[in-house]
Amino acid sequence: MDRSKDNLKNEDFRLVEAFKNNDQQAFEQLVSKYKSNVFKTIYSVIGNQQEADDIAQEVFLKVYSYLGSFKFQSALSTWLYRITYNETIDYIKKHKNRFVSLDKEINEGEVLTVGDLLHDTGLSVENQMLVKEVQSRVRSTISSLPKKYDMVLTMVDLNNLSYNEAAEIMNISVNKLKVWLFRAHKMLMNKIGGL
């Protein structure tokens, strides 16, 4: 583990311990630290800001409820992403057939990724309109992927989680995650090939 991850883990440990000692500000700091990544993870799957906000609130309510019993058997971020994953999957099960994800290379060998297309703001107005059209098509294409592949792409490619972290969050083996990621990339490439 590198020094920056050790520092993050130590900071998380300090905040969790402070929360366990009734320091509400420590919880607010944890929310502030992780809210953006939690929201982005949910939004990249759900595709609706209001719904993603609602799910993120549910995630942090659960975190608040269970943080006192957190024992650091894994990194806090892994535990938090596991809750995020579970809440998102629960929401999807209740509201089937409405969701999208966001990232992977468009064609083999090309440097431009779907994530780049979906987040590029340094373009002329003409090109921004073209990019919005491509974004819409990409979102539509990705929404047709099975949710397990959608989540694997989101965690590994969009949120840059390691295979180990993503596998732990999804409660699957690293080998299974790699297979799902390979299949997800292949399905995405096949579907995007016609764009």
Image (spheres, rainbow, N blue to C red):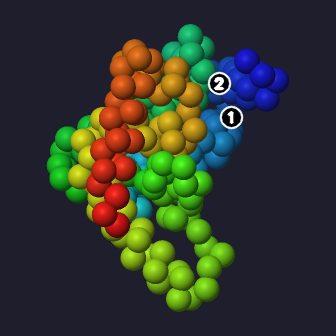
**Amino acid tagged 2:** Val
- Residue at 51%, 25% (x, y): give it: 163
**Amino acid tagged 1:** Ala
Query: Is any part of residue 18 visible from this angle?
Result: no
Classify residue 18 by image quadrant.
top right
The residue nearer to you, when weighing 74 against 70, is 74
From what the image shows, is residue 153 above or below residue 12?
Answer: below
Q: Residues within 10 Å of mark 1 (few under 14, many from 20)?
A: some
Asked if residue 20 lies left or right of residue 95, the reply is: right
Look at the image and tell me in which quarter the N terminus lies: top right
Q: Which residue is mark 1?
A: 26
Mark before the other along the chain sequence, 2 or 1: 2
Q: CA distance from mark 2 to mark 1?
A: 7 Å
Classify mark 2: helix, strand or loop.
helix
From what the image shows, is residue 10 above or below residue 23?
Answer: above
Task: List x then y, in percent, for residue 167.
Answer: 44, 22
Residue furthest to the front in view is: 109
The residue nearer to you, when weighing 147 against 183, is 183
Asked if residue 147 lies left or right of residue 68, the reply is: left
Asked if residue 195 lies left or right of residue 94, the reply is: right
- Residue at 79%, 29% (x, y): give it: 4
Residue 68's disc number: none
Task: List x then y, in percent, for residue 112.
Answer: 56, 58
Residue 16's disc number: 2
Q: Residues at badges 2 and 1 in contact (C-beta under 8 Å)?
A: yes
Classify residue 146 by image quadrant.
top left
Task: List x then y, in percent, for residue 170.
Answer: 38, 25
- Residue at 44%, 76% (x, y): give it: 132
From what the image shows, is residue 113 above or below residue 177?
Answer: below
Task: List x then y, in percent, for residue 166.
Answer: 47, 27
Classify mark 1: helix, strand or loop.
helix
